Image (cartoon, coloured by chain):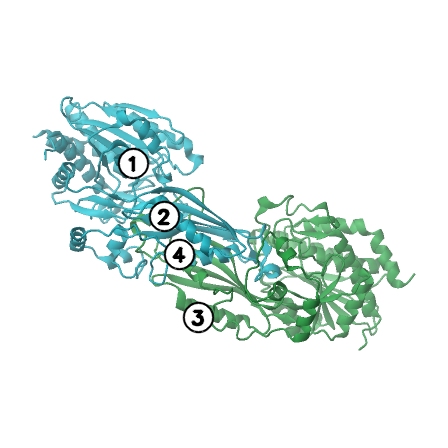
Chain colours: A cyan, B green
Amino acid sequence: MSDLDRVLARVDADFEAALERWTDFLRIPSISTDPAHNADTRRAAQWLAEQLRELGFDASVRDTPGHPMVVAHHPGPGGDAPHLLYYGHYDVQPPDPVEEWDSGPFEPTIVEGPHGRRMVARGAVDDKGQLMTFVEAFRAWQAEHGTLPVQVTAFFEGEEESGSPSLKPFLEQHKQELGADVCVISDTGSWDVETPALTTQLRGLLYTELVVDAPDHDLHSGLYGGAVPNPLNALGRILGQLHDDQGRIAIPGFYDAVVEPDEATRAKWQALDFDADAFLQGVGVDAAGGEQDRGVLEKIWARPTCDVNGMLGGYTGTGAKTVLPARASAKISFRLVPDQDPEAAAEQFRAYLHGIVPAGCSWELIVHHGAPAIRVPTDSPYLRAAREALENAYGREALLIGCGGSIPVVGVMKEVLGIDSLLMGFGLADDRMHSPNEKFEVRCFENGIKSHVALLDRMARGVGT
Amino acid sequence: MSDLDRVLARVDADFEAALERWTDFLRIPSISTDPAHNADTRRAAQWLAEQLRELGFDASVRDTPGHPMVVAHHPGPGGDAPHLLYYGHYDVQPPDPVEEWDSGPFEPTIVEGPHGRRMVARGAVDDKGQLMTFVEAFRAWQAEHGTLPVQVTAFFEGEEESGSPSLKPFLEQHKQELGADVCVISDTGSWDVETPALTTQLRGLLYTELVVDAPDHDLHSGLYGGAVPNPLNALGRILGQLHDDQGRIAIPGFYDAVVEPDEATRAKWQALDFDADAFLQGVGVDAAGGEQDRGVLEKIWARPTCDVNGMLGGYTGTGAKTVLPARASAKISFRLVPDQDPEAAAEQFRAYLHGIVPAGCSWELIVHHGAPAIRVPTDSPYLRAAREALENAYGREALLIGCGGSIPVVGVMKEVLGIDSLLMGFGLADDRMHSPNEKFEVRCFENGIKSHVALLDRMARGVGT
């Protein structure tokens, strides 16, 4: 039996225990965006560091101005072995609306689905399940061979869901320690449950909050309505002017920096077996939104968006209250594509608002965080190694795909450490990331571990040219 | 000393006790629109009935499918005395946002202000303080003369702030019992603290709720944004199309039934000493909203409106959450003017929505309640009696004014009992009805009691022709 096959057999033998470890990790409500859970977020970091110590890593929890980083080093076999930097995030999205979960968001539950068993919990796939695919791969290698076949640094942050404010400063301060040949990230998707994929394009993100005020206190809508500006009416008017009739974002200059995908890429995407109707029906809608002259896949992978994520103002309780409220607010985020710059986009939005906020209203635009879109080089020996590892685990060729989501760390790794990233992920489109009843297929978890086991092997054999 | 002067002296002597009784009434959190306060709402009805029994009324609390009615009869002196029906409501608006109150909304507090003492509590003016002006007038007459100078029926409902669903059926069932010559209501305003007024025009009201859905669960805005309809974007787009660039309501046909005030009325309003800038600055805005080609007073008294009263959807907590939410909703109410019909306006709105809700979204329009605008006849002996009573109490002529708010009972009284209403109120523009820190000036409360004492006297002397 080859070295690789022995490790894969170890994965099988130890699999139920791996599920238990994943479950323990999921129980910790590490919600980074909510200060009430700061202690839980730290606890998740400590749990990960302890796991890695068991596997022969020199692991530590490093404080930052925000949530701590986990930094762990394994020397590997020494000599000329490549040095891989694995990245993940141990924080999760808020679980609300909690009442829509079938089981507790932090009470991990395995249920049966069309693909066999699935784990249901907040963070099941994003990102705890996915990062455990390589932690378990390390465990299996270490258990079988007493070491890893390459030099490995594992690096985890706890702020990915809240804009990663501490990430760049930390990487800059620890540039020497964290240098490696390439970064490996599991936070994206497969093409489907049987077909693996590498993601080569990610959208960027700009997250803002708009607050509109008019009267200095809530007013009676009879005594003042029609003469005093209503911030909710104003906010509605503003939101209604963010897009034109064709679904295009109406902010002047917004599309100027957009670079369309090249012909080869568009042809590849066209050739993918994508059923747009089924995709939309899968989330309960019968017509697409957005730009009317573009296909669904192209819109998600290569076009920018403007989405209202939250809206609040006035009386929202039971029944009626004829109030003309003092304040209205909306959380508005933009997905960006190459080569849009988040700061420039924010300024374009701000300039547009100056022109469209109705008279009599005051307003404030808060920019929470931003990150540009990413294109990952496809003519890379690391990418070829990843494709071979995936084909080994799945028995099927890996597709090269885009992704509508954003993983800002990829840009930061390139900018600060000068390294590219391999986006080798195992999620599925229906995993309900950021939604109630988030899940990760146990089959995908298993394929993920085995793909990472194979990647370590392929990297150890040398990536050549 | 005349009969009238003796009663006015009694009012002065008993005034501090009247403030105590008013305070007791204000302590009861009779929030009709919130079922959690049903017992409190009933308790307020019982308190009122007990007050009236002390004053020689045959008073009872009458159950309805909703909150109870209070019906109380005083035979008066007998003979040919006119029969007056007094109306008020013992329910109050919800107090939120509670954190913006300086004192508890149901912990009535007297503080000093520019006009002397003022009572601060939810319901201080709307409507408990105002209805107590005539209940205290009854008390003073009864205490001084052992009877009232006219036949009086006092009728109070507990659902005015939630659309009065039980009102019309109850009046229809008790038409005989509640018949009278004229209805007297204190739920409107003076012109200012020194100048009394009678309100001769009220706006109508149509209260709706719009719910927009698209995906069947909250989605990740990266994985779906730009291709799946976003109900918050859609709601923003809809709200943005409710008005045109000139501030006019954009619903087709909405203004068709609107009747402009006649020349005489417009001239009267023009002659009023109204400072529009001060009015707007008083609520912290420096520019008017609404139709750009109309003055402030005209807009509030004689033009219809469309106001968003509440808006809710998506993630509204601390920080960022990149969700594409499943549902968005808004509470949208319209103030109506003569001769708009609430049902017709609702259908116009519904028809407009059919055309503007974006593809891929489903929606529902809930119509909570509606009432048409009211014009009160000015050439009436009752109105002349009220003017004289106000002049007696204030030492100054009463103005005839409009009101931007709605008091649907006026239309119901006319329709079911065939009687007109006298809108003799004592509120001020800065009383913060429906807002935190609602107040009623003690001076206005006192003037109100004395105006009602004088009205009873004037009515007893015969209203003639």
Residue type at mark 3 is Ala
Estimate the x, y position of residue B146 in percent, counting from the top left.
Answer: 86, 61
| Left or right of B44, for residue A351 | left
Q: Residues within 10 Å of mark 3 (few under 14, many from 20)?
A: few
Q: Which residue is mark 3?
A: B351
Label annotation for residue B317 = none
Depth check: give the residue in front, B82 or B391.
B391
Badge 4 is on which residue? Answer: A242
**Three-letter code for the amino acid on which mark 4 is drawn:** Leu
Q: Nearer the viewer, residue B221 or A408?
A: A408
The reply to whether dot 3 and dot 1 touch (C-beta < 8 Å) is no
> Mark 2 to mark 3: distance in Å?
37 Å
Q: Is residue A430 left or right of residue A348?
A: left
* Residue located 82% across and 74% down the image: B80
Helix, strand or loop at label 1? It is helix
Residue A78 position by quadrant = top left
Q: Under tag 4, what secondary structure?
A: loop
